[in-house]
Image: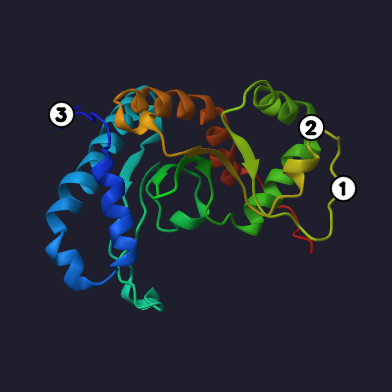
């Protein structure tokens, strides 16, 4: 894929994010916009494009697209008087009008940490109902899918649970069965790893590991709709 190769973020990236946090206004941002473009946006785009090129090449049938978040907040959501985000992320996903209810791969960088993984911003209740129905019909198949998670320490399962516990068919499926939405997430501190092109390999390896989970959730759309319960 043509484009600038990712060579790493730099200490200037985090200097900019921290300075923006304490000077989150248009006057300061306009004065330091070149720093944003060179030290923050440019390496984020390069990282996203390189990872996307690898993933979209290996999984062309999925028709993935790649997005980089805008630093400018939606004007309708600027309630704190701060018009700029101090974090930035990219996503790899299928085209969808309802991106919040579609599983996406993401990488996010903030002044304190970086994360990446796979998940929903907010899964639809019907999606999770189909998920539970599929587990009910074949719990052993789902146990086989999640078995690799117990053999690694890169990703952890996260997501809000129902206050009223739902009865899973097996103990191994219980945690997944009670989620309202989900994310498989890797949480990481700021370290020298971010300053290296080797970050590309880690993300590609992680997304490849997560692809069976993406395939599982993306195919739920075709399942018959079960009766929703409280």
Where is 210 relative to 168, above or below? above
User: Badges 1 and 2: C-beta atoms under 8 Å apart?
Assistant: no
Residue at numbered disc 2: 139
Examine the image and state in which quarter residue 168 appears: top right
CA distance separating discs 1 and 2: 13 Å
User: Badges 3 and 2: C-beta atoms under 8 Å apart?
Assistant: no
Residue at numbered disc 1: 167
Mark 3: secondary structure: loop
- State the image coordinates of residue 108 (x, y, percent, origin top left): 41, 46
Precedes in sequence: disc 1 or disc 2: 2
Disc 3 packing (10 Å; few <14; some 14–19; many ≥20): few
Precedes in sequence: disc 3 or disc 1: 3
- State the image coordinates of residue 62 (x, y, percent, origin top left): 41, 34
Q: Tell me what residue is drawn at x 70 percent, y 25 percent.
A: 150
- State the image coordinates of residue 66 (x, y, percent, origin top left): 31, 42
Q: Is residue 185 left or right of residue 45?
A: right
User: Badges 3 and 1: C-beta atoms under 8 Å apart?
Assistant: no
Which numbered tag is attached to residue 2? 3
Q: Tell me what residue is drawn at x 20 percent, y 53 percent.
A: 36
Mark 1: secondary structure: loop
> Considering depth in this image, is 117 or 59 the residue closer to the camera?
117
Q: Quadrant of the N terminus?
A: top left
Mark 2: secondary structure: helix
Q: Tell me what residue is drawn at x 28 percent, y 35 percent.
A: 47
Disc 1 packing (10 Å; few <14; some 14–19; many ≥20): few
Where is 38 relative to 216, above or below? below
The answer to whether residue 172 is visible is yes
Choose mark 1 or mark 2, whichever is in front.
1
Precedes in sequence: disc 3 or disc 2: 3
Examine the image and state in which quarter residue 114 appears: top left
């Amino acid at each position: 894929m043509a484009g600038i190769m990712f060579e790493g973020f730099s200490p200037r990236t985090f200097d900019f994010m921290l300075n923006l946090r304490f000077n989150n206004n248009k006057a300061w941002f306009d004065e330091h916009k070149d720093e944003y473009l060179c030290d923050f946006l440019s390496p984020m785009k390069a990282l996203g494009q390189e990872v996307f090129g690898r993933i979209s090449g290996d999984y062309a049938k999925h028709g993935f697209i790649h997005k980089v978040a805008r630093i400018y907040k939606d004007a309708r959501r600027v309630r704190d008087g701060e018009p700029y985000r101090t974090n930035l992320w990219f996503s790899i996903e299928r085209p969808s009008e309802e991106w919040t209810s579609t599983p996406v791969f993401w990488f996010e960088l903030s002044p304190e940490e970086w994360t990446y993984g796979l998940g929903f911003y907010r899964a639809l209740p019907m999606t999770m109902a189909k998920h539970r129905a599929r587990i009910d019909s074949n719990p052993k198949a789902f146990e086989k899918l999640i078995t690799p998670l117990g053999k690694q320490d890169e990703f952890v399962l996260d997501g809000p649970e129902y206050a009223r516990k739902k009865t899973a068919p097996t103990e191994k499926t219980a945690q997944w069965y009670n989620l309202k939405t989900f994310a498989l997430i890797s949480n990481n501190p700021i370290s020298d790893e971010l300053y290296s092109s080797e970050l590309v390999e880690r993300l590609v390896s992680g997304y490849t590991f997560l692809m069976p989970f993406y395939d599982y959730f993306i195919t739920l759309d075709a399942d018959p709709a079960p009766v929703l319960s409280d």
